Image: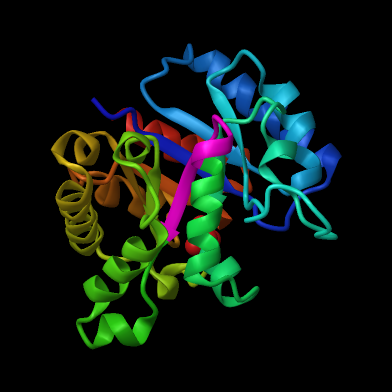
Amino acid sequence: MRTPLLAANWKLYKSLAEALAYADALLAALDAEGDCLRVELAVCPPFPLLYPLAEAFKGSSVSVGAQNVSEYLEGAFTGETGINQLDGLGLGYVIIGHSERRNVFRESNEAIADKLKIALTKSSLVPILCVGEPLDYRKDGRELDFVKSQLQTALKDVEPSDAERIVIAYEPIWAIGTGVNAEPKDAEEMAAEIRDWLSGSFGIAAAQSVRILYGGSIKPANWKDIYAGPNVDGGLVGGASLDPADFYTLYQLMLG
Ligand code: PGA
């Protein structure tokens, strides 16, 4: 059984004080609910907030994740944060290959493959690998080819024994931060195709273990329908994760 996951991607938002107030509010809501562990929660803040938030959420069902990691282990790489700095902070996850990293910061498919490999082989963190097509590929009906080629490059060095640890987030680029979400049937169809591709590449057991998330303009009004897809194991949420009440509402929708 795959444990559903709802992950908050805060991007470049929140001060330390705001992050700690958010943790208090989310923990209070979960306590009141009797925190049932049927759905995993993760919060991915900017780097300097990782450790304070990992301390704030210690012992709860909320994990903390990084939004990126260097493809280099160590060396003369000013401004980078490596897996050795992340491992040991008490984190659960690391997002790899978000479309903003790929498009704004020009991260190549090869760099993303290196990041995935380093996270899998040099840490105990669970990588959340993001894939997703630009609008013109969707319009031309070539979205699957695009996503498959991203998967092929990113996972080319992954051992079958490591594959089941990966979480894959399908985030169509045209849906991120735009208010336009994918249709539930399209999100489910792509999640099913990704699982099928995993099965062909790593075997049925790994494909059945990997959690596949949807991301892109998730909000309380659309989440129940998107999450209903049997291959959609949760969500990666940007804008609607910034308010703890909204994030908590999304979580409650997953409890059914
Ligand atoms: P959004 O962002 O929910 O604001 O569309 C999702 C993401 O970038 O992961």
Where residue 24 sits in the image (x, y, percent)? 71, 25
Would residue 191 be found to the left or right of residue 121 on screen?
left
Question: Is residue 194 shown left or right of residue 33?
Answer: left
Residue at image coords 75%, 38%: 85
Q: Is residue 63 above or below residue 238?
A: above
**Residue at image location 44% in from the left, 40% down from the top:** 250
Quick check: 185 above or below 107? above
Residue 58, image x, y percentages: 67, 18
Magenta residue check for 126:
yes
Q: Is residue 94 magenta?
A: no
Question: In the rendered structure, which segment of residues is drawn in magenta?
Answer: 120-130
Foreground residue, 27 or 71? 71
**Identity of the residue drawn at 77% across and 56% down:** 80
The front one of 160 and 13 is 160
Expressed as whole percent of the image width and height from the top left, the position of residue 214 reads 36, 53
The residue located at (44%, 72%) in the rendering is: 173
User: Where, quadrant-wise, is the C terminus in this rendering?
Assistant: top left
Residue 183, image x, y percentages: 25, 65
Observer able to see residue 246: no
Q: Quadrant of the N terminus?
A: top left
Q: Is residue 43 above or below residue 101?
A: above
Residue 16 falls in image quadrant: top right
Left or right, 143 with respect to 179, comes to left
